[in-house]
């Protein structure tokens, strides 16, 4: 017998995820709405926060990134990524019915009502607010400043050929938050890290968008994958090269040591490997490359943290 609220797993969901296996059936559609079964999203939101916290620790001569801040960023990233996805699905509920990969999402498939989605959005936003209020006043103001970009993003794909830039402005915001939480201000290193993180986001989300390129053409959704077309490899390569250049400048500005630059070199090699493996016609391969950015980001964070310790 099919359980209530059962639905086929979305194509980019992690197979056998705990949310699909063990969560109560009535809760599953809401967990899907928050993309809990696709943790790569909150990882990619979290990593710039951790990089920034580690870079701030290096600049301040501290032995490690503030562990309380890192834990708060983790909780906040999960909550706010879920809130962002819920908001995105509310805005895109009609478009999602016309795209193969998204028509089984909870809203277009009828698993969750619009009122239920709005209530769930408010709950996740409240968790994010509680987390944000644990920081200093400047960091709180910096966090609130990102909300306008987050609100704007779902609409950009309707008329802007590079909506990934707006996504980058939002998803890279953590590169400012770690520094703001540590110092109560922003420095040049944080701004450079933010610019590098934006370029990284544009690159990896272009790879992600390759999964939908045919449906997007039919529906009329704009994306950097469609914009670059046959030149998607050099397009992503340019984004990743800019990311490395800005991050290297941030490391110099913060006074990072040799271990940080060694980690950045490994990060760069990983990104170059991704570019070499891009195939416009291989959606499953694009998803694997996209997910691999978590590992690349963790390598960089580990190197920054080791640099603090040593």
Image (spheres, rainbow, N blue to C red):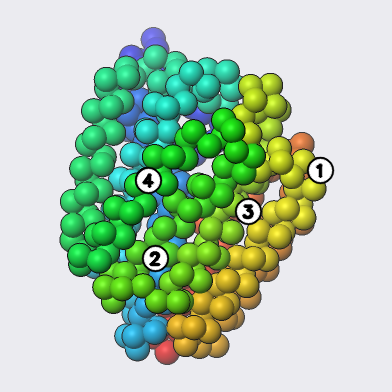
* Crowdedness near tag 1: few (<14), some (14–19) or many (≥20) residues, C-alpha within 10 Å: few
> Residue 176's mark?
2
Residue, disc 3: 203
* Crowdedness near tag 3: few (<14), some (14–19) or many (≥20) residues, C-alpha within 10 Å: many
As drawn, 71 above or below 223: below
Residue, disc 4: 148
Toward the viewer: 253 or 256?
253
> Residue 19's mark?
none
First along the sequence among labels 1 and 2: 2
As drawn, 38 above or below 257: above
- Residue depicted at 57% across the width and 42% down the height: 163
First along the sequence among labels 3 and 4: 4
Instruction: Find residue 53 and report its image quarter.
Output: bottom left
Q: How far apart are labels 3 and 4 at the CA level?
A: 22 Å
Residue, disc 1: 230
Mark 4 or 1, closer to the camera: 4
As drawn, 53 above or below 45: below
- Pointer 1 and pointer 3: residues touching (CB < 8 Å)? no
């Amino acid at each position: 017998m099919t359980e209530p609220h059962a639905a086929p797993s979305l194509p980019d969901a992690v197979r056998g995820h705990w949310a699909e296996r063990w969560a109560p059936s009535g809760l599953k559609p809401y967990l899907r709405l928050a993309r809990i079964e696709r943790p790569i999203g909150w990882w990619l939101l979290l990593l710039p926060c951790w990089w920034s916290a580690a870079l701030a620790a290096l600049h301040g001569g501290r032995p490690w990134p503030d562990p309380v801040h890192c834990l708060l960023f983790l909780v906040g990233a999960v909550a706010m990524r879920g809130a962002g996805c819920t908001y995105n699905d509310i805005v895109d509920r009609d478009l999602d019915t016309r795209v193969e990969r998204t028509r089984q999402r909870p809203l277009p498939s009828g698993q969750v009502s619009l009122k239920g989605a709005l209530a769930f959005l408010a709950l996740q936003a409240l968790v994010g607010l509680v987390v944000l209020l644990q920081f200093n006043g400047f960091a709180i103001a910096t966090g609130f400043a990102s909300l306008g970009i987050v609100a704007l993003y779902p609409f950009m794909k309707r008329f802007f050929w590079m909506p990934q830039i707006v996504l980058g402005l939002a998803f890279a915001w953590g590169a400012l938050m770690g520094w703001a939480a540590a110092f109560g201000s922003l420095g040049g290193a944080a701004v450079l890290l933010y610019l590098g993180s934006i370029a990284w986001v544009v690159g990896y989300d272009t790879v992600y968008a390759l999964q939908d390129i045919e449906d997007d053409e039919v529906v009329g959704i704009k994306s950097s994958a469609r914009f670059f077309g046959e030149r998607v490899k050099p397009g992503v390569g340019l984004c990743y090269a800019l990311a490395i250049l800005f991050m290297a400048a941030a490391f110099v500005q913060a006074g990072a040591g040799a271990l940080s630059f060694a980690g950045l070199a490994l990060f760069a090699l990983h990104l170059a490997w991704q570019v070499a493996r891009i195939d416009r016609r291989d959606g499953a391969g694009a998803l694997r490359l996209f997910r691999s950015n978590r590992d690349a980001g963790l390598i960089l964070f580990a190197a920054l943290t080791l640099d603090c310790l040593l």
